[in-house]
Amino acid sequence: MQYDLIIKTIQNQITNEKDDLARISNILAIIYEYAEDISWIGFYFKKDDLVLGPFQGKSACTRLNGKGVCWKAFTQEKTIIIDDVTKEKDHIFCDSSSKSEIVTVIYNKNIPIGVLDCDSAITHRFKKEDRAFFEEITNILSNEINFSKFTQI
Ligand code: SME
């Protein structure tokens, strides 16, 4: 499915359901099912560490121990794309099939509260248009979802 259709589907999900956990769970399932070549997608929320939230894909590291690409994106408040995770010293390996990733930052009232982490089983999966898509998703989520109950900030 094209990204603009995925975004419309996500917006419908937000319009039709008011429970935030139900919304974000289904939003992840929509991206996982309809975006191409996605092996894992999920949230890490800031608590006493970055801690695993809802996700789609194989079981993953529950805590990032202040390390990894997710932690870097979160602390630097910027999107990070890794074309080949085997060449990235900061990458934390949760799943050996992961080859590339994109991490975008999630905000609650302009305060960073976590990240959306998306992995692919192919290298160089995430390009300029994919960055724009994931940044639009995290922008919608940051504006529409009350993430305060999922964090300890
Ligand atoms: N990619 C992360 C680790 C989490 S897993 O990929 C689900 C990182 O290096 O921050």
Image (cartoon, grey):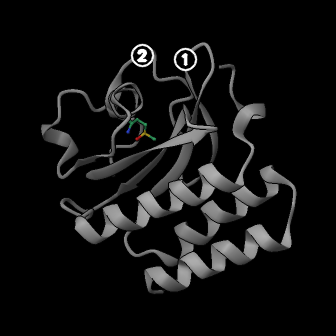
Please give the residue where the numbered disc 1 appears in the rendered image: 49
- For disc 1, the neighbor class at 10 Å (few under 14, some 14 to 19, many from 20) is some
Q: Quadrant of the C terminus?
A: top right
Q: Is residue 102 above or below residue 48?
A: below
Q: Amino acid at mark 2?
A: Gly
Location of ligand 1 given as a quarter of the image: top left
Q: Residue at x 20, y 59 (%)?
A: 123
Q: Is residue 112 left or right of residue 22?
A: left
- For disc 2, the neighbor class at 10 Å (few under 14, some 14 to 19, many from 20) is few
Residue behind label 1 places its C-beta within 8 angstroms of ligand 1: no
Which one is nearer the viewer's eye here, 19 or 38? 19
Q: Residue at x 46, y 23 (%)?
A: 64
Residue 75 can be seen in this image = yes
Q: For the residue labelled by badge 1, is the local secondary structure a helix, a strand or a loop?
A: loop
Q: Position of residue 142 (x, y in %)?
A: 60, 49
Circles 2, 1 touching at the beta carbon (< 8 Å) = yes
Please give the residue where the numbered disc 2 appears in the rendered image: 66
Q: Residue at x 36, y 20 (%)?
A: 67
**Label for residue 74?**
none
Q: Position of residue 45 (x, y in %)?
A: 60, 32
